[in-house]
Image (cartoon, rainbow, N blue to C red):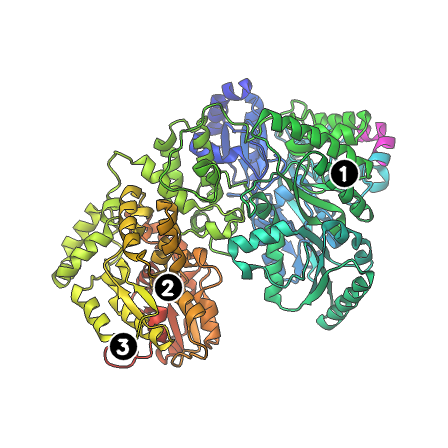
Amino acid sequence: MTDTITGLEPLVARLTETAPGLRVETGPGSTGPYAYDASNYRVPPRAVVFPRSADDVVAVVRASREAGVPVTARGGGTSMAGNAVGPGVVLDFSRYMNRILDIDPAAGTARVEAGVVLDALRSATALHGLTFGPDPSSHSRCTLGGMIGNDACGNRSVRDGRTSSHIEALEIVTADGVRAVADRAGLHPLDPRDAEHVARLEADVRRLISDNLAQIRTELGRIPRQVSGYQLHHLLPENGFDMARALVGTEGSCAVVSAATVRLIETAPAVALLTLGYDDVVDAAEDVPEILRWSPSAVEGMDEAIVATMRARRGPDSVTGLPEGRAWLYVELDGADEETVTARAAELLDALKAGGRMTGGRVVESAAERRSLWRVREDGAGLAARLVDGGESWPGWEDSAVAPEDLAAYLRDFRKLLASHGLTGVMYGHFGAGCVHVRIDFDFASDAGRDAARRFLQEAAALVVAHGGTLSGEHGDGRARGELLEVMYSHRMIRAFAAFKEVFDPDGLLNPGVIVAPAPLTADLALHTPEVLLPVSTLFSFPHDEDGFEGAVRRCVGVGRCRSDVGGVMCPSYRATGEENHSTRGRARLLQEMVRGETVQDGWRSTEVRDALDLCLSCKACSSDCPVGVDMATYKAEFLHQHYKGRLRPRSHYSLGWLPLTSALAGYVARPLNALLRGPVGRILARLGGVTTQRTIPAFASRRALRSVLRATKTGEPAKALLFVDSFTRAFRPQVAGAATRVLADAGIPTTAQDGLCCGLTWVSTGQLSVARRIMARTVAHLDNGDERPIIVAEPSCAAALKRDVPELLDTDASRRVSARVQTFTGALTDLAAPGWTPPPLPENVVLQTHCHEYATFKGRGPADLLRRLGVRKVDEAEGCCGLAGNFGFEAEHYDTSMAVADLALRPRLDGIDEAARDDGRTAVVADGFSCATQIDHLAGDREVRALHLAELLDPAADQPGGTS
């Protein structure tokens, strides 16, 4: 560590000299998030470097060697064994070296840089009917370089095997900065001047293999998933001295991979999925040998804890299609045509029923249902990390594997071992390959707990070896299992591993502490915290986290779903910028560093944390999309409250944070004020308030407008619900309140309007929590008056604030009673409408922007589902944030990011609207959120595109006087 610290300044100076323009980050705000991957470990780097080319990699490796600074290569940072953290320089390949260099459909190969995300490669090759076979559950964010480092496998490894089976050649940088190609015929220099050096490397490796033939032949390659250690058997004479495959799985400890040529496979035209239920995972494992006789493409297993957590977090309808049971297998078959594959699936199901172990089974025919079920399995690591009861579980023994026919016996003994240590494990994984992932409720925070974990892991290693298995089946050894390799291999084999690394990395600078000369498995644990942590006394109660704010930010375990570019809504700022610090994970890790008080030493006053949180749109999507339920919007609100306590705030916190109050006053002088704001004075006021001048300030409605609208909608019927008239509806679009009242009455839900109250949202989003609590307390006092009728809120963001922020800030029984009554407009029509209610005729097509807060807080009650049920033929939903996000997109410094987020999903949907279909009423644009509708109006420009609230679309009086215009 001393060398690392003293070597940093000369390293940075050397890089500035040899690689001008290379991005090097050394501050705690940049390095903090890279202290973690998806494992239990925390190793703060001294610098993070973002190479753009192989020449940059050469410059970094050479400069690091001169300065005596270790180098760790990193892709998506999803490694679960501590493979992607290191004490010196971390090379992040994902930021810039993420290009697909070539696809050769005829040869069935692709050449890619190390930072290419797997799904990006699969999307590109799908155009040719090809794909890359290995498919880890992290496929939406893991990189090819990381897969090569760990020899990753995935859900379909029963058919497609490990990454090493799909590698034609690797382009590497050696520890002394020489570029070479490793392929099936050895090592080849890329620069002729390095020929002698590369030849010497190859000769040393050949001599090493020759000296250890017996050990390599008897100890390596015994079972399909034997990933632990180095894969030296690929260098045996009978295997053709395949240097590329031998370097796969070395976890960046022998060479830095900058690019690879990979082999592609054809995509199966048809697939069928079976879901099978069992009483427990051992029963499921007993059926695996029979299932394998049917040549499946996938055989995946999981236990009840994962399913229960998914249903609790995303709603009871989030997991459908599973038969009764406490453990399940997914069995996928594929083939040339759907009829044949489905028939085979039915035959397999009958055969398994005859075996008598299942509690039930079915063939899943719907493609949408298959995708939903696969998501449950793919989110297993995150779902298992924080369970329904709030308990935490950790990796460490999450990757053992045995031969598939031995799996049931191994699991039976493994469960006994867990019980003997008083531990609980959540199990899921690749049952068809004999590889089981287990997250265990270790106590890594105490000395006694760490000692107990060490004893368990040593006994677990002995157990899996006794069953002929391996410590790692695809995640690699990393820091979690390197120390245990001596349980699995002979001393001579361990020495051969060390000699192999020494040939390539004689100074031990490449990813030290991994595989060879491993760090102790309980060293550098993230939960091994300093004696004194940041004092944490917060206004939010964080009721779902036993340790309050500290426990809440600890939810992030690094699985990195927030780094995905597709699927779900999280994380819009990362999708717009591609920066780790702008991901939910990056921010959560930096907050963890703030709580520790080591690298980030100024606590709540930290400018590094403030800057990392700055581009968080507070969309709340992470609270739903993140498998562990990280809620960055709430963490940001709490941080801003603490950070600016007793200090002057940004101007926009006053101009936009206090909008409910100022807009109420503006209603008395709406007409002259609107005229004033349209001219030069408006631009001056915008600048003074920190508001962008690139947007038109929405026009304020007069106080009379809302009163007039509500008077016109009175029916005299007894009200079954309250219509909460929020500040945005009251101030900017009172016609929505009128439309909502009419639609709800038409649906058999007559309402009475509740005006003059506020949910406190704008004060929450700007971190003015003391004011928010006072506003909320007043609102709750008015609403909690013995009335049990539903509270229907037309503005989704205000509904979400009443549903979630109010009880979490006030933490009172009254606030929870009010929260339980809150419904969105969509939710009210879904749950409360009279049977047989039908709306007026609707357009054929709807372009829909669902508000992020509605998406996150009211799962299973989305407008897209309602519109389809009401008869809209096509709902084209912009999956993602609109980019305006309340105050965010109005703040001058955030305008560009706001528009970049809009470009991801919303703008393409608007640009794709057929003008003729819009003009004749066949297509409508719907956005219930005021901010979403405002962004749509801004994006439309001169085009006649207006976003309707769902109430306006369904309004029975839309074409009548006084109805929605």
* Crowd rating for badge 3 (residues with CA inside 10 Å; few <14, some 14–19, many 20+): some
Q: Which part of the image, by quadrant, shows the N terminus?
A: top right
Task: Give the amino acid at mark 3.
Answer: Thr
Whole-Å distance between the Cαs marked 1 and 3?
A: 73 Å
In the picture of the structure, the residue carrying the numbered disc 3 is 715
Whole-Å distance between the Cαs marked 2 and 1?
A: 57 Å
Task: Give the amino acid at mark 2.
Answer: Pro
Q: Are marks 3 and 2 in contact (CB under 8 Å)?
A: no
Per the image, is 227 magenta? no
Per the image, is 208 magenta? yes
Residue 540 position within the rendered picture, expressed as x and y whole percent measured from the top left: 38, 42
The earlier-in-sequence mark between 1 and 3 is 1
* Rendered image quadrant of residue 114: top right
Residue 636 position within the rendered picture, expressed as x and y whole percent measured from the top left: 38, 42
Left or right of 402 on screen, residue 810: left
In the picture of the structure, the residue carrying the numbered disc 2 is 790
The vertical placement of 942 against 643, above or below, is below
- SS state under label 3: loop
In the picture of the structure, the residue carrying the numbered disc 1 is 470
Q: Are marks 2 and 1 in contact (CB under 8 Å)?
A: no
Q: Looking at this view, is 95 or 807 the one in front? A: 807
- SS state under label 1: loop
Q: Looking at this view, is 494 or 117 the one in front? A: 494
Q: Looking at this view, is 69 or 834 the one in front? A: 834
Task: Give the amino acid at mark 1.
Answer: Thr
The residue at the far right in this view is: 214
**Which residues are the magenta region?**
206-217
The earlier-in-sequence mark between 3 and 2 is 3
Count of numbered circles in the view: 3
The vertical placement of 155 against 184, above or below, is below
* Crowd rating for badge 1 (residues with CA inside 10 Å; few <14, some 14–19, many 20+): many
